Amino acid sequence: MVDRRELLVSAALQVMRREGVAAATTRAICTQADMPLGAFHYCFHSKAELFRLILDSDLQESLENAWSALDPALTAEENLSAVVATYWTAVQADPQWCLVLSELTAHCLRDPELAALPARDYARYHTQVIAQLERFLADSGFRCSVEADTLADILIAGLAGITSSWLAHRRDDIARTSLDAFVEMVAATITPAASS
């Protein structure tokens, strides 16, 4: 039997994808899940708990899958290209999910009860990217001209920015050019140990 919390999370996401975060009232979520209104308050202490689960579900499966493609035998640019390509395939496959995440993050930042969620989510994501970068550098013997935590922030911010721009203009050619340039710039900070 499917857990009621999972059904409510799924219902909330359906409402958000269709109508936006503001439309995801407890009543709308329960209606979507075909449950009585009391079921929400039985399963969750607050909407903050629901939003936390939604943000946690993201983290960020697309990039977790992307990092698994790293190959120490390839150049830094080839590896970054593979990571970015995997991430971008996930973005293009589900732009509504990207919109929900963007909208949910902005919503949380404006709500005192929820304001800490984006920072917590970012910190966890940032830690994962640092770990993947450090593993790659150790396995490949490459060196980086910037600290791993700085490079992780650059990667997260760059991909988020290009994603946001693409959601606005939906021009695949522009996004692809930007992604290629971004990869080239980031790869320039990573060199074989012998040359550093």
Image (spheres, rainbow, N blue to C red):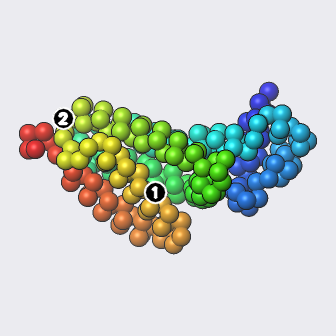
At label 2, the amino acid type is Gly
Which residue is disc 1 drawn over?
A: 160
Amino acid at circle 1: Ala
* Residue at horizontal 10 percent and vertical 44 percent from the top: 196
Q: Position of residue 60 (x, y in %)?
A: 51, 43
Where does residue 152 sit, x and y in percent of width and height? Answer: 35, 46
Res 77 seen here: yes
The residue indicated by pointer 2 is 141
* In-front residue for pair 26/159: 26
Of all residues, the one furthest to the top in this rendering is: 1
Which-is-in-front pick, marks 1 and 2?
A: 1
Q: Earlier in the sequence, mark 1 or mark 2?
A: 2
Residue at x 18%, y 41% (from the top left corner) = 143
Q: Marks 2 and 1: in contact by CB < 8 Å?
A: no
Tell me which corner region of the image, top left, top right, bottom left or bottom right, holds residue 68.
top left
Q: Residues within 10 Å of mark 1 (few under 14, many from 20)?
A: some
3 sits left or right of 112 in the view: right
The residue carrying pointer 2 sits among few (fewer than 14), some (14 to 19) or many (20 or more) residues within 10 Å by Cα, namely: some
Asked whether 113 or 194 is in front, the reply is: 113
